[in-house]
Image (cartoon, helix red, strand yellow):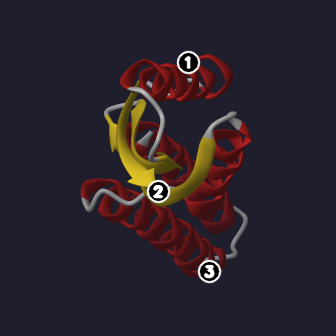
C-alpha cells in the first residue's frame, strides 16, 4: 500500500513538473512555484497517511469497530454469558482475535468446547478472521 501511494506521489510530481515547464514556455514563471507548493502538500499528506497507518499496525493497533462487530457475534452464540476481554491484531494481512468468554460454571468440558468451536467458526467463516484463540472463564 505504501509503495502504491509513493507511486501516486511520483505521478503528481511528474504532473507538477509538466505544468511548471508549460508555464515557463507560456511566459508564466509564477506557475512553477505554485504547482510545486501544491504537489509538496499532496506529498506531505500522503506521507502522513502512510506514517499513521504504519504506526497503528506496528503497535498492534486494531479497528475498534471490527471488535464491536465480533463482540456482537460472540454474544449471540448460545451459552455465552459475557465477554471478559477481547483483543485483535494484524498478522500480515490476516486478523488474529483473542477472546475470554464467560460461560456457566456448571457446563461440562464438551459443551464449553463446542461453544468455543462455534465462536471460532463464526468469526473465521463470516468475517475472514485468520485465527481465533478462546479462553473460557466459568461464571456462576
Q: Nearer the viewer, residue 110 or 68?
A: 110
- Mark 2, Cα crowd under 10 Å, few <14 / some 14-19 / many 20+, is some
Q: Badge 1: few (under 14), some or many (20 or more) residues near its Cα, within 10 Å? A: some
* Residue 94 in picture, x, y percent from top left: 41, 29
Where residue 139 is drawn, which disc sits there? 2
Above or below for 59 versus 93: below
**Side of 69 relative to 110 (left or right):** right
Q: In the rendered structure, find residue 34 and report the number of the disc placed on it.
A: 3
Q: Position of residue 8 (x, y in %)?
A: 53, 44
User: Quick one: SS at disc 2?
Assistant: strand
Residue 126 is at least partly visible in this image: yes
What's the distance in space between the residues labelled 1 and 3, CA to CA?
56 Å
Q: Earlier in the sequence, mark 1 or mark 2?
A: 1
Please name the residue shown 68% across and 34% down the image.
77
Q: Which numbered disc, 1 or 3, marks the residue that appears first in the sequence?
A: 3
Q: Position of residue 116 (x, y in %)?
A: 47, 28
Residue 89 visible somewhere in the drawing: no
Q: Nearer the viewer, mark 1 or mark 2?
A: 2
Q: Is residue 46 above or below residue 110?
A: below
Q: Earlier in the sequence, mark 2 or mark 3?
A: 3
Q: Are marks 1 and 2 in contact (CB under 8 Å)?
A: no
For residue 121, which numbered disc appears in the image? 1
Amino acid at each position: 500500500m505504501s509503495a502504491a501511494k509513493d507511486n501516486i506521489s511520483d505521478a503528481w510530481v511528474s504532473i507538477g513538473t509538466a505544468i511548471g515547464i508549460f508555464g515557463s514556455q507560456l511566459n508564466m514563471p509564477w506557475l512553477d512555484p505554485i504547482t510545486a507548493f501544491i504537489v509538496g502538500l499532496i506529498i506531505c499528506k500522503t506521507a502522513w497517511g502512510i506514517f499513521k497507518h504504519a504506526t497503528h499496525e506496528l503497535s498492534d493497533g486494531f479497528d475498534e469497530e471490527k471488535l464491536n462487530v465480533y463482540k456482537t457475534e460472540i454474544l449471540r452464540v448460545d451459552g455465552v454469558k459475557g465477554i471478559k476481554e477481547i483483543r485483535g491484531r494484524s498478522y500480515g494481512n490476516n486478523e488474529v482475535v483473542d477472546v475470554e468468554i464467560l460461560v456457566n460454571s456448571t457446563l461440562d468440558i464438551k459443551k464449553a468446547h463446542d461453544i468455543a468451536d462455534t465462536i471460532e467458526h463464526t468469526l473465521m467463516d463470516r468475517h475472514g478472521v485468520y485465527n481465533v484463540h478462546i479462553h473460557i472463564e466459568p461464571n456462576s
